[in-house]
Image: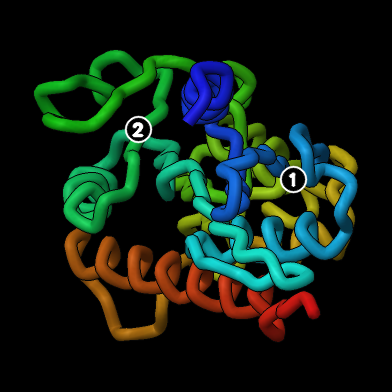
């Protein structure tokens, strides 16, 4: 692998940017394919770009046959990330559960008395307003966002930012009545019906959860379900170039 390729892959990792390294096995020629561009000797081949982006979408490396040439598609995608807005009791159960499943977990809450590493050992804690934290962190297709505070001042800006991004999951704690009021507030902020329909609210699978830990299980189960459905939809039929 060329030094410039290694540097480009490291840069993509730092920026949480998905990329596929396409290598022609006959001569080790390399092409980097991103969601929005491509660099390398095969960058102008539409069949390669389609196959590389499909592999990127489903997060699976593979070897394809492209016009009689074997091409290895090595996929590098950001790890799944869960951003929890609200350093509450449910979050104390949800954060370690998600971390056990290899989610990159961040808890965001401007309330310093709640958002502490003592209450959330082993995960990143950000004492900031969610919309401001999101600007620094960036939101991408590998990210899930859950709001748990019940406080519109904290939850609404987070939901507005998340719904304007391409995160794969948005969930919000609250009753059906709370969710209806939330919809009205976000509509005033410019969120459309289509955008709001992405919110899972009341959040979590309907498993009769009552305790904070049970609710955390229901939320994490719904996140896993949403991610699986998204990957299935994006995979589509396998692309085989003649």
> How far apart are labels 1 and 2 at the CA level?
28 Å
Disc 2 crowd, CA 10 A, few/some/many (<14, 14-19, 20+): many
Left or right: residue 86 versus residue 91 is right
Q: Is residue 196 above or below residue 236?
A: above
The answer, for residue 201, to whether it is visible in the render is: no
The residue labelled by disc 1 is 35
Q: Residue at x 75, y 34 (%)?
A: 40
The tag earlier along the polypeptide, 1 or 2, is 1
Q: In the image, residue 166 lies at what x, y percent? A: 70, 48
Q: Residue at x 59, y 45 (%)?
A: 27
Numbered mark located on residue 107 in the image: 2
Disc 1 crowd, CA 10 A, few/some/many (<14, 14-19, 20+): some
Q: Secondary structure at mark 2?
A: strand
Q: Is residue 137 above or below residue 75?
A: above
Q: Residue at x 51, y 46 (%)?
A: 77
Left or right: residue 44 versus residue 78 is right
Q: Secondary structure at mark 1?
A: loop
Q: Is residue 8 above or below residue 179?
A: above
Left or right: residue 99 versus residue 238 is left
């Amino acid at each position: 692998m060329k030094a410039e390729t290694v540097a480009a892959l490291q840069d993509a990792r730092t920026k949480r940017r998905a990329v596929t390294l396409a290598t022609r096995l006959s001569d080790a020629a390399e092409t980097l394919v991103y969601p929005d561009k491509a660099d390398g000797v095969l960058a102008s081949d539409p069949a390669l770009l389609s196959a590389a982006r499909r592999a990127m979408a489903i997060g699976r490396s593979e070897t394809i046959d492209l016009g009689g040439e074997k091409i290895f598609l090595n996929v590098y995608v950001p790890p799944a990330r869960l951003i929890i807005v609200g350093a509450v009791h449910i979050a104390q159960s949800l954060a370690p559960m998600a971390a056990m499943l290899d989610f990159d977990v961040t808890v965001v809450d401007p309330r310093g008395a709640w958002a502490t590493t003592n209450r959330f050992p082993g995960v990143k804690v950000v004492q900031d307003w969610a919309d401001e934290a999101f600007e620094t962190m960036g939101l991408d297709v590998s990210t899930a966002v859950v709001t748990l505070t019940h406080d519109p001042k904290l939850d609404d800006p987070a939901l507005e930012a998340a719904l304007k991004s391409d995160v794969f999951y948005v969930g919000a704690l609250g009753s059906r009545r709370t969710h209806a009021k939330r919809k009205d507030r976000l509509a005033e902020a410019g969120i459309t019906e289509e955008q709001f329909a992405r919110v899972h609210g009341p959040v979590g699978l309907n498993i009769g959860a009552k305790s904070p830990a049970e609710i955390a299980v229901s939320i994490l189960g719904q996140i896993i379900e949403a991610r699986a459905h998204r990957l299935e939809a994006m995979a589509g039929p396998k692309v085989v170039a003649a």
